[in-house]
Structure formats: C-alpha cells, structure tokens
C-alpha cells in the first residue's frame, strides 16, 4: 500500500531535505513506522514515548484531519496524499518539551537551580556548530551531546588516522580510514539519541562559511590552522554570532569567548597572523594527549553558560593553561575600536582570501630553495651521484619510520652543527610532512648553500607513494 507523505519545511532537515516521500502502510501508524525506519531522527519530533502523536502535530489524509478518522488507526488508501502539519507559531520549531526519559537523563541538571527544567529546555533548543572534529572538537561535542544540546553541527572533511587516537577520544581503532564525521555521529548518537547532528563534510571556506554558520546560535572553534581561525572569527562577526575559542600547542592551552555582548573579537587580540612556519602546528610540534580534553571541556562549559545565560563568561578575558606547571592564568583583553572587522569603522566587510592573508600561498616565493617530489628522489637514489638526505625529525620519530640512506640531524640541533655540512653538496631535507624541512631549507639557503631541496610531503608522502611498508603518522 503506497502513498505520498508530504514533509513540512521545519522537518526536512531530518529527511535529507526531501519534501515528499513514498511510504507504505494501510494506516497512519504503519505509514509513520515506515517513515521512522527510513529517517529515525524525525521520530522524537512527531510522537511521544508511548507512541502517541505530540499535541502540536496534526496529520491530514486527502485533506481530512485523522482525529476525525480514527487517529493513528485511520485508513490510508493506495495513492493517498498524507500531510504532516505541525503548529508553526510556537510549535515544533520552538517547542522543546522534555520527554519522560529526558527528565531522568538530565536529572542532575534539573536539580541545579541555575539550570532546572527551563534551562534544560534552553539547552535542548540550542543549535551549536563545532568547527573541527579533532583534538578540541571531540571533547566539545561529547560533552555538549551529553548535556542535551538539541542540534549540533560539525564541520570536518578528514578521515580517522592512527596518530589521532592519542587525543581524539571520539574515535577507536575500528574507525581508522573512515570519515571522522560519520564516525563521530555514530558515537554521539549512541551517547544521546535526543540530539540532532548535522554534518558538514567540507572544508570551511570563504565561499561556504556564511551559509553554514548562519543557521546556528554560536560557533565553537576547534580549528588547528590560522586561515580557518581568522575565517571563523570574521564570519562570526559578520553574522553577529558568538565564537567560543580554544587552542592548544604542546603543553599550553588558551580559552576565550569572542564577539559576544560587545566584547572583543579574535582580531582585537591578534590583528594579523604570524609569518608562515614561525608557529608549528600540533602535528609538527606535538601536543600532550590530555590537553585538548582540558581545553575542550572548558569550551563546552562556556558554551553551556552562554545558552543558560549564567555565570561570569570569558568575554574580555583570555585564559592561559600550562599543563607542565598545572597553572591557570588570566589576561584582560579589550575590544579594539580600530579593529578592521569589529571596530567602529570596519574595513573588512566580507570574507576574504584567508590563505593569502596568512601568507601561505606566497610562502614559496619568499624562500629560495627547490622542492623535490618523492618520485624524483627515488630516481636520484638509484644513481651513483645521488644527493645527501638530511632527516630533521626527532629521535623518536625514527622508531616509526625512516630512510636508511638519510643522515639524521634534529631540526633544533642543525644550526649548531651546520659546520658539519658542505655548502657545495646537493642536499635534500626531509621531515614528517615538509613543514620543518622547509624552515631548514630556508636557513641553509641563507647560509649560501649551493643546492638545497625540500622533500615535498616528507616521509609520509614517501610512505604513501614509494615505500608502502613504512608507517604513516
């Protein structure tokens, strides 16, 4: 028994944007059962725990209200026009009634006077976008899901790698090679079936950022690079959406709230990024595995405080954490009225090219050395006059993967050992991905070395395209 089920616009986010579905069933209950099997996320928004229709949802068959035709037992003939009609003014899109099971689930929240039933409804009504499903995004999304945030969007386009598992607590060994967002959704839905997850499996860019972010109440910044961090900041300012900021590196963490209640934005604190290569990424410089958990949960804490409108928020305050000394310290920051984005006379009124702004696209023009791909190096190594390879990684990295032909001189040691090298020799500099080696190439070029090349992509690229027996990390 096939019929057409019309989906109203507030519910289409649960049906992948489809406005009409073909469903089977000889009564309304069977039709809904077929709908829920295909799109389980919609169920909680239409029926109560006992299976009855929510009081703000009506269903019409061929223009007639089912309440006069037997309710869920109302007959649905082949080819019928079935329409779900939720209450729009104060109805499904804004009504966030707690179910009996949610009263049990959130009982520890409900017993807090600062939260209570109304506060938990606010949490359920909230829509939060988490940018990045890495070290920070994992604890942020775990705790916001557990707290009952009704809608969580996630932006990432990476896959799970074994090196992620040291700190990215959403994932396990079974998810290696799989989409981070799909793996995250699977874990988070198991944690809380009452949260709706919207996955944006794309790179956040100037072309799509405003369209993605505009549907959320706030953004939690879990980015790991400067172009995306400035992009998130500027988009939040343009859309007037708060930005819950966090960052991590080695043993240090930072937390603040930008662009909220007249407070500063990220550019008020850092008007421009550091030169490319000056601040290594976590991949190059490392990060203590537990650190993103500490910083990410602090970000989740500030997010819930914004939703509940409680406590003393980190607006105009910049929290620093040193894991080695177990020390928190705080700086006061102020809004810069001359800020190019949020100041009284902004000059940045639309999103720009953030890679260019951060100097990434022009970096190769500034540094005088050659790039060598792994296939070309492989050919050179077969010749008697092959170049000398210098591996500038740390000692522990050699235990993961190494080239037997390479000379090992750690990056930080090389300036003090430069006299060991011959400026007339052909050198290929190698690290994990090509970032540290690029800095050494620049250094050697400035020391008048005649022939210096950077191995593009580093040993990881060699492992992907030349020697697949080597580990990628």
Image (spheres, helix red, strand yellow):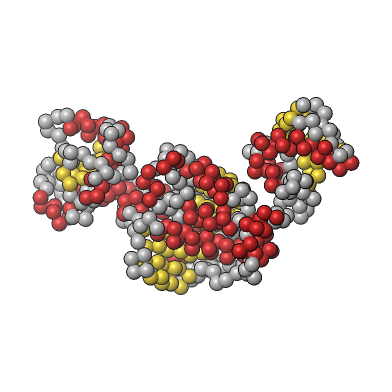
- The x, y position of residue 267, in whole percent, is 46, 62
The C terminus sits in image quarter: top left
Instruction: Judge by depth and name the residue closer to the eye, 440 or 108.
Output: 108
Q: Name the residue located 61 percent from the left edge and 50 percent from the top edge.
A: 195
Q: Name the residue located 40 percent from the left edge and 52 percent from the top edge.
A: 167
Please indicate whether residue 436 sits to the left or right of residue 219 in the image: left
Q: Name the residue located 44 percent from the left edge and 40 percent from the top edge.
A: 174
Residue 471 occupies which quadrant of the picture? top left
- The x, y position of residue 13, in whole percent, is 65, 43
Determine if residue 421 is in view.
yes
Compared with residue 268, is residue 413 higher up or lower down, i.e. above or below? above
- The x, y position of residue 50, in whole percent, is 74, 47
Compared with residue 281, is residue 183 higher up or lower down, i.e. above or below? above
Instruction: Judge by depth and name the residue closer to the eye, 398 or 451.
Output: 398
Please indicate whether residue 285 sits to the left or right of residue 95 in the image: left
Instruction: Judge by depth and name the residue closer to the eye, 424 or 97.
Output: 97
Instruction: Judge by depth and name the residue closer to the eye, 243 or 369.
Output: 243
Q: Name the residue located 38 percent from the left edge and 70 percent from the top edge.
A: 327
Determine if residue 265 is in view.
no
Compared with residue 456, is residue 257 higher up or lower down, i.e. above or below? below
Q: Residue furthest right?
A: 68
- The x, y position of residue 110, in whole percent, is 65, 64
Please indicate whether residue 33 sits to the left or right of residue 357 in the image: right
What is the total number of numbered labels drawn onto the structure image? 0
The N terminus sits in image quarter: top right
């Amino acid at each position: 028994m096939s019929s057409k089920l019309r989906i109203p616009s507030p519910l289409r986010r649960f049906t992948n944007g489809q406005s009409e579905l073909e469903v089977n069933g000889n009564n309304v209950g069977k039709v809904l059962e077929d709908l829920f099997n295909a799109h389980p996320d919609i169920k909680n928004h239409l029926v109560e725990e006992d299976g009855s229709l929510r009081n703000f949802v009506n269903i019409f068959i061929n223009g007639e209200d089912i309440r006069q035709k037997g309710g869920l037992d109302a007959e649905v003939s082949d080819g019928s026009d079935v329409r779900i009609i939720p209450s729009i003014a104060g109805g499904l899109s804004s009504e966030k009634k707690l179910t009996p099971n949610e009263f049990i689930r959130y009982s520890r929240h409900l017993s807090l006077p600062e939260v209570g039933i109304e506060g938990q409804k606010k949490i359920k009504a909230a829509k939060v976008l988490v940018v990045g499903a890495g070290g920070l995004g994992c604890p942020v999304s775990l705790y916001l899901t557990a707290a009952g945030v009704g809608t969580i969007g996630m932006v990432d386009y990476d896959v799970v790698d074994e090196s992620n598992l040291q700190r990215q607590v959403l994932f396990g060994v079974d998810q290696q090679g799989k989409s981070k967002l799909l793996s995250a959704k699977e874990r988070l839905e198991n944690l809380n079936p009452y949260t709706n997850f919207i996955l944006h499996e794309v790179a956040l860019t100037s072309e799509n950022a405003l369209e993605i972010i505009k549907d959320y109440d706030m953004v939690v910044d879990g980015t790991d690079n400067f172009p995306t961090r400035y992009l998130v900041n500027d988009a939040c300012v343009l859309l007037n959406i708060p930005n819950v900021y966090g960052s991590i590196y080695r043993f240090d963490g930072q937390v603040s709230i930008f662009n909220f209640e007249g407070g500063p934005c990220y550019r008020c604190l850092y008007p421009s990024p550091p030169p490319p290569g000056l601040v290594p990424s976590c991949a190059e410089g490392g990060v203590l595995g537990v650190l993103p958990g500490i910083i990410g949960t602090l970000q989740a804490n500030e997010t819930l405080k914004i939703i509940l409108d409680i406590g003393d928020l980190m607006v105009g305050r910049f929290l620093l954490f040193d894991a080695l000394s177990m020390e928190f310290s705080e700086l006061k920051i102020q809004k810069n009225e001359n800020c190019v984005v949020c100041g009284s006379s902004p000059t940045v009124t639309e999103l720009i090219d953030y890679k260019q702004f951060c100097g990434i696209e022009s970096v190769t023009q500034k540094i005088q050395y050659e790039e060598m791909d792994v296939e070309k190096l492989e050919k050179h190594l077969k010749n008697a006059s092959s170049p000398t390879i210098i591996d500038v990684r740390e000692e522990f990295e050699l235990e993961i993967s190494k080239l037997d032909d390479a000379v090992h001189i750690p990056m930080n040691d090389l300036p003090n050992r430069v006299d060991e090298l011959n400026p007339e020799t052909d050198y290929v500099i190698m690290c994990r991905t090509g970032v540290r080696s690029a800095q050494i190439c620049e250094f050697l070029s400035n020391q008048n070395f005649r022939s210096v090349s950077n191995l593009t992509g580093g040993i990881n690229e060699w492992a992907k395209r030349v020697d697949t027996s080597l580990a990628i990390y």
